[in-house]
Image (cartoon, rainbow, N blue to C red):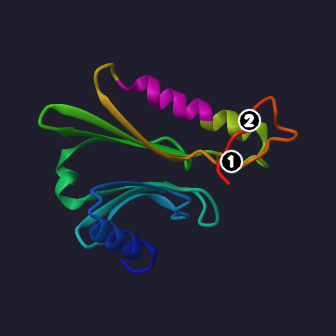
Amino acid sequence: MTGKGRELADMMERRKVDILCVQETRWKGSKARSIGAGFKLFYYGVDSKRNGEGVVLKEEFVRNVLEVKRVSDRVMSLKLEFEGVMLNVVSGYAPQVSCELEEKERFWSELDEVMESIPTGERVVIGADFNGHVGEGNTGDEEVMGKFGVK
């Protein structure tokens, strides 16, 4: 694979990252494919122009994958087992502020369903773009945002 998939694989290899959640992939389909440098991408997307979710794993961990849940082009999860320990990797991409309320509610509902489906005692890692805002000031957003942030 060339392009952005190969870029991801190269970066993961260089930085010694074994598992990576990716958002806004804009890859259409529901697949798992090798992206080079010993990494495999599990992804889901319905539109090549927007959204899309993925989880990239080191190829040696693919045998540890027990379940892949492709909920939507904004939420997906992988369940892996490492020496008897269950690890759930959840990838999410929240709608931006300008999106319709219905789309935002659907995302949070889907994420909640995934989280509720994970049995007590299993480990969970969430890698997501929650489209939060960081910075000083909250004029007009006082009810939902604190006034402290990073300059």
Residue holding disc 2: 145
Membership of 138 in magenta stretch: no
Please name the predominant secondary structure of the magenta segment in the image: helix
Q: Which residues are magenta?
A: 108-118
Classify mark 2: helix, strand or loop: loop
**Where 149 falls versus 20 (above or below)?**
above
Residue 89: assigned label: none
Q: CA distance from mark 1 to mark 2?
A: 9 Å
Tell me the quarter of the image containing the C terminus.
bottom right
Toward which corner of the image does residue 122 lie, by quadrant?
Answer: top left
**Where 24 falls versus 111 (above or below)?**
below
Q: Residue at x 43, y 56 (%)?
A: 43
Image coords of residue 71 (percent x, y): 49, 41
Image coords of residue 15 (percent x, y): 31, 66
Q: Are marks 1 and 2 in contact (CB under 8 Å)?
A: yes
Classify mark 1: helix, strand or loop: loop
**Where 37 falls versus 134 (above or below)?**
below
Q: Nearer the viewer, residue 113 or 121?
A: 121
Res 69 seen here = no
- Quick check: 21 left or right of 140? left
Image coords of residue 22 (percent x, y): 46, 57
Image coords of residue 35 (percent x, y): 33, 70
